[in-house]
Amino acid sequence: MEELKLYTYIAVFGSFAVYFGIAWWARAGSTSDFYVAGGGITPLQNGMAIGADWMSAASFISMAGLIAFLGYGGSVFLMGWTGGYVLLAMLLAPYMRKHGKFTVPEFIADRYYSKTARVVAVICLIIASLTYIIGQMKGVGVAFSRFLEVDYDLGLYIGMAVVWVYAVLGGMKGITYTQIAQYCVLIFAYTIPAVFISLQLTGNPIPQLGLGSTLADGSGVYLLDKLDMVVTDLGFKEYTTDNMGGTLNMFAYTLSLMIGTAGLPHVIMRFFTVPSVKAARMSAGYALVFIALLYTVAPAVGAMARLNLMNTIEPVAGQNLEYAERPQWFKDWEKTGLLQYQDKNNDGKIQYTANAETNEMVKVDRDIMVLANPAIANLPNWVIALVAAGGIAAALSTAAGLLLAISSSVSHDLMKGVLTPDISEKNELFAGRVVMTISIIVAGYLGLNPPGFAAGTVALAFGLAASSIFPALMMGIFSKKMSGPAAVWGMCSGIGVTMLYVFQHKGIMFISGTEFLGGLEPNWFFGISPNAFGAVGALVNFTVAFIILKATSEAPQHIQDMVENFRTPHGKVAAAHDH
Amino acid sequence: MENQSSYWRENLRLIFICLAIWFVVSFGFGILLVEQLNEFRLGGYKLGFWFAQQGSIYTFLGLIFWYTKKMNDLDKKYNVEEE
């Protein structure tokens, strides 16, 4: 155990030292450095940075855990969080890069020739990004509290301090290069244990193939068939067919995550950092390569972790593990309170079943699955240490990207764009750093009082981005006539409907007790869960915008010309007049 | 101008083809038709389950790179590349 602690300190603080070094080397000198890294990032670098920016604590820590317990239902995260890149590459990124501005609200302001549109976009952006950050902060706290055995709160404070140093110092430039380093840390940390575990269970070192292979115990049974058998024996739903809340819910959930991915400003912003339209298209492809490396391994990690957990508790059917003989990792996680056992029938053994009356594993937090996985599989200590560093890298890199999106939308869009247009570049840069500091403190506060588990809150952020920002951007590019007022009404009604639906089921601002329809499934609209509602919100957004466009006048000619212009890669963009 | 609108039309056609495939592999094979496809197997994977957790992601990758290549060709054909 002492050896593990030493390795963990080396891995975590060693990686911090690297991030700080990079941040110092790539510190930002101008607003262009701070917002878009001077526009000089190559597609390959950008793809890697998007990978780290994108893959958050939710992807690294929570997703495989969710899949482990949801089985087939967990596919919504896999398809939803990758399919959005197809939309980004084809519907948004190249045109927004061609337009060539710093932020997403700035694009909306130009396209919809309206300060109101800009402010509405800023508000939508801040709501979505803050919701998203909560998940990251919780991820940092969990990783620290388990691996460095410090308090959850203290872990959170350390995480805040680290992000503050390199995000505030480096802006987009520092963040980009740190994210490249963080991508390397997190992908190694994720795949190495997966390779070991796949090898142990199936004899195949490639997890994507291992998941479809037979078990290495000589039985000739396929891993997934065995898992289906084990879980159904204990009364759980069959792993490979358990569809979360039905087909319609899965459909809406996947769609929400896909268009939410394409509408998340911290991801779109990354496409402003490359030098050309061609490079923007290419970055989306590279980004998905780097993301797919983790996302195709995750289902294997989930299924194998579940099987290992079941086998530990009940090695042979009917012969359950004695509580007194539980392994070390079990005790470690019990200390954090994320794993709880209660001997209901006083036989000293552990029964883990789907029946709430007899189930003695009263709490198995899904977020612990990835972090506990290497220990469950008896992997060497340095692997466990690596996973700790990887989880923290994933959370920090995403938090930094989000903080940048928030701070640029305040300093560049609200201050420079609307409130104090004649602010000097130096002061704007300073304001950006101040806003970032404030955002970190707010995010930290929300991390101390988090609603739900990490992936749950994150999924919500997608619903909000899906219902507000994505439709406005897409209509701005594909409908030349779409007018400012129509887009503003669309955004407001889209995000309004989604937030109302979420709040009525999950509590106003997530404060439990204030939900007025209860979080219960019978009250869900057509059985669609609050997290999946973004797709409906987006539909409302599109519908409202087109109805209002029909009733009012279309966009002025110079705006239509501007749209013509950013639809092709060559030539310069005409200046927007009302801006 | 004439040139530009046929460039845009060809782009829209490409996007339509890509998004049709995008929809079929994920929402189609992975969700709506999953039960029917699960009758077939790919090694230890049920086929519908495989599309939902593996196949759709590989297809997305192929789509983006194919679209990028096609668009680069289109930029050349219509002579609208960046300076």
Image: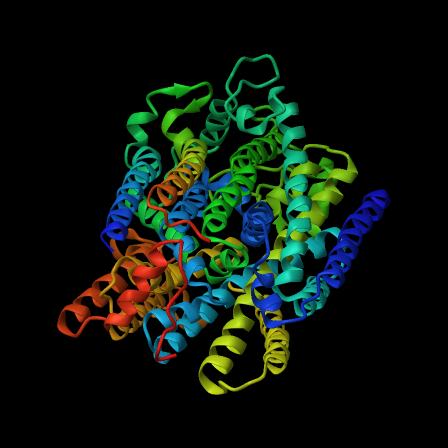
Residue A438, horizontal then vertical, whole percent: 61, 77
Please determine whether, in this image, residue A544 is positioned above or below residue A45. Answer: below
Q: Which of A556/A81 is in front? A: A556
In the image shown, does A405 or A203 lie closer to the viewer? A405
Total residue callouts: 0
**What colour scheme has been applied to the protein in the rendered image?**
rainbow
- The residue under the point 51% across, 68% down is A130
On the picture, is A390 further left or further right than A454?
A: right
Residue at x 64%, y 30% (from the top left corner): A195
Image quadrant in which you'd find residue A402: bottom right
Which residue does the image show at 40% across and 62% down from the upper left? A465
A577 is higher (above) or lower (below) than A383:
below
The location of residue A201, given as percent across then percent down, is 62, 24
Q: Is residue B25 visible?
A: yes
Query: Could you tell me residue A213's position as x and y percent?
Result: 53, 20
Task: Quadrant for the N terminus of chain A, please.
Answer: top right
- Residue A479 placed where, x, y %? 25, 60
Task: Residue A463: name its quadrant.
Answer: bottom left
The image quadrant where one finds the C terminus of chain A is bottom left
Where on the picture, by quarter, is residue A505?
bottom left
The answer to whether one can see residue A512 in this image is no
* Residue furthest to the left: A551
Residue at figure coordinates x 56%, y 60% from the top left: A39
